[in-house]
Image (tube, rainbow, N blue to C red):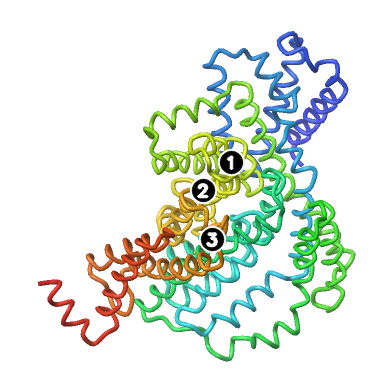
Amino acid sequence: MPWYDIVLGLVGMACFFYYVFNFEAIAGKATRISKLDVAVAVVGILIVAEVCRRVVGWPILVVAGGFIVYAFSAGYSLTRISYTLFYTLDGVIGTPIGVCSTFIVLFIILGAFLEKTNIGAFFIDLANSVAGKASGGPAKVAVIASALEGMYSGSSVANTVGSGSVTIPIMMKTGYDKNFAGAVEAAASTGGQIMPPIMGAAAFLMAEMTELPYATIAVAAIFPAVLYFTGIFLMVHFEAKKLGLKGLPKESIPNFFKLFFRKGYLLTPIAVLVGTMSYGFTASRAACLAILAAIIVSLFSKETRLTPTTFVDALENGAKNTIGVAAACAIAGIIVGIVSLSGIGLKLADGMLTLSGGIDIIALALTMIACIILGMGVPTTANYVIMSTITAPIILQLIPGTPVLAAHMFVFYFGIVADITPPVALAAYAGAAISGGNPIKTGVIATKLAIAAFIIPYMFVLNPSMLLIDSHIVDIVQIICTSLIGMFAIAAGLEGYMKKPMPWWQRLLSIGAGLALIDPGLITDICGIAVIVFIAILQYGDKGKVLESRADA
C-alpha cells in the first residue's frame, strides 16, 4: 500500500474520531465553531471526496462541487458551510449515509452472496433457453439476462461488466456491430435497475421515502419495466431481421425445464426477500433472511456450495462494493445539505415554473434534465436518494395533485437513465470497453434502445393509470395491450424496419402512432391503431405494394 494511502486513512480516522468526540460540544454552535473545527471539517470532506473519486468517479463530485460553489456565491461563509456539511445531520453524515448504513449495505452483501452462488450464470443459461435460437438470439439473451441480473446488482455499470463480458463477444460473433452490441448490454443492464421486485434495492428505499407499502411499489413498477424491456427486445429483433442474423446453434441451447428443475432453487433467496417484505418485515430483516437463504441453498450443489474461502470472499466483495455506495451517499449528503442550507430546492422549483410558463409538459422536461445531470455516475441507491430529496418535491410543487408514487417513479427513471445518456453514460462506456466500440456512439444507440424510459415516466405524472393508480381491470387491460402495440410501432420506426425496410414517412407515422398508443386515452388509441394497421398492410399485406406505390407517388 502506498504511503500516501496510509496517511490518507490515518487522517480520515482522526477526522472521524474528532467528529465523534466533539459532536455534542459543537452541535448548535453554527457560526461560533473554532478554526480547528472548520479545518477538520474541510479535511474530512476532502477525504470523503477523494474516496468517492477513486471508487465512483468525477461526475457526482462535479455536481456536488457546483452546489458548494452556489452556497458560497449565495453569501454563506466557509464556517457556516463546513458546520452544515460536517457537524449536522443534513450533510455528509445525513439521510443518504444513514439509509446506506441501515439496510443498503445488507442488500449489497446479499448481492455478493448471490454472485458467489453463480446465479448470474444461471440467468444467462435461462435466457439462452428462452431466446437463444431466435433471430439475433445472443442480443435477446443479453436483454433477458441483464433484466434478471440488474435486479440485485445495484449498479448499471457492474451489471454491464458482469454479464457483458459473456454476452457482448457472442453478439459481435453473431454479426452485430460492436457499438450496437455494447449498447444492447448497457441499455438492458441499466433497465435492470428499474426491474421489480428489487429494483437495485431502490424499491425498499422508495417504500421508506413515500411511506407506501413495498408491495404497492413493486406491483406498480411491473408494467413500466415490461414495457421498457419490450422496447429493447423489439428493436434488437428488428435489427436482427434487417441484418439477416440467425440464432445460436440448437445444440448449444439448454432445455428450459431441465435447467429450471436443476438450478431453479437459486431463486429461493429472491423469493424469500420479496415474500418477507410483502408480509411486512422490515427491509433489514428481510435482507438478513435472504442472505441466510442464499447460504443454505448454496449447499444443495457442489458447483454452488459456499466454502469458507468463498464465504469470506463474499463478505469482502460486499464490503468493497459498500465503500463505493457509501462514498456516493456521503457526497449525496453534501448536495442534500446545501439544498437544506440555501433553500435552492424552492428556487429551482420557482425557476422551472417560470421557464415552463406553467405548462406541465415543459416543467417535466426541465425536471428530466435536472435528474439526468444529478444522476450522472451515481449508484442506484444513492441516485434515488438524491432524486427523492431534490427533484421529486419539485414535481409535487409544480404539478399539484400528482400522486407521490408517480413523482418518485418519474425522477427515479430519469436518474437511472443518466448511465446511458451521453456525454457521461458510464454504462455505455463500460459496454464500449468490452466491445472495443466508440463510447459516444454506444451511448447514442443505447439511448435509442432505451427510448421507452424517456417516454413512459411522463405518463406516470400525466396519466398515473400507467402505474395502476386508481385504475379498474378494464383500464389496466387496455393500457397493457395498447402500450405494447405502441412500443412495437416505436421500435419499428426507430429501427426503420418491420417486415421490410421502411421509408422515412412510414417511420415518422409509426413513431407518432406508437406515442399515441402509449398515452392512455380512447381517442389516441383509436388514431394510433388506425395508423399502425395502415402501415402493417403496407409492410405485410400483398396489397401493401399498391398502396405504398400510390403513397410514394
- For mark 2, what is the residue? 414
Q: Answer left or right for 405 relative to 180.
A: right
Q: Is residue 298 above or below residue 91?
A: below
- For mark 3, what is the residue? 224
Q: Is residue 38 above or below residue 323?
A: above
Q: Are marks 3 and 1 in contact (CB under 8 Å)?
A: no
- Residue 83 lies, in percent from the top left, at 71, 18
- For mark 1, what is the residue? 387
Three-letter amino acid code at the position of disc 3: Pro
Of mark 2 and mark 1, the one earlier in the sequence is: 1
What residue do we see at 75% from left, 63% from top?
A: 274
Q: Are marks 2 and 1 in contact (CB under 8 Å)?
A: yes
- Residue 357 lies, in percent from the top left, at 37, 32
Three-letter amino acid code at the position of disc 2: Phe
Of mark 3 and mark 2, the one earlier in the sequence is: 3
- Residue 47 lies, in percent from the top left, at 70, 30
Quarter of the picture containing the C terminus is bottom left
Closer to us: 142 or 345: 345
